[in-house]
Amino acid sequence: MILRYTLAWVPMVFIAIINGTVRDLGYGKHLSELRAHQVSTVIALMLFGAYILALTRLWRIDSTQAITIGLIWLLLTLGFEFLFGHYIAEHPWEKLLHDYNLCAGRVWVLIPIWIAIAPYLFHLL
């Protein structure tokens, strides 16, 4: 089951890309960059939540599996975000870390937190 859930992480990359594309081509043109970032983060939280809820209903897991899956997804998410972002997209570390600055109104840190805890929370439901 862990392998199945690990592979199920891959569509989350596409969910994030589609969410970012909709922001950049749509509502992001009508909002400040910070507000667009915040709206995009909330939308991503909802999309990931719906996806993870569907997965936990489709493939039942126990609490240990849920915790393990959340940690694997957290590592995959942060690894992708920072390694792909820096080495492939060639964003400087400062730019990548900027989205995690809560003091500047950046709320992206909620995404990896949500991805890490959602499997366990939905398991409890």
Image: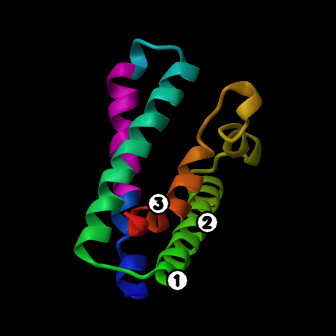
Q: Tell me the residue at 43%/85% (across/down).
A: 2
In the image, residue 51 sits, relative to residue 2, either above or below, namely: above
Q: Mark 2: few, some, or many residues within 10 Å (few <14, many ≥20)?
A: few
Mark 1 or mark 3: name the one nearer the start of the chain.
1
Q: Residue 79, which numbered label?
A: 2
Q: Residue under circle 3?
A: 118
Between 116 and 9, the one lying in front of the other is 116
Q: Which residues are magenta?
A: 13-27
Which residue type does callout 2 highlight? Gly
Q: Residue under circle 1?
A: 64
Quarter of image, res 51 = bottom left
Look at the image and say whether residue 70 sits in the magenta stretch. Answer: no
In the image, residue 92 sits, relative to residue 43, either above or below, namely: below
Q: Tell me the residue at 50%/59% (across/down).
A: 115
Mark 2 or mark 3: name the one nearer the start of the chain.
2
Q: Mark 3: few, some, or many residues within 10 Å (few <14, many ≥20)?
A: many
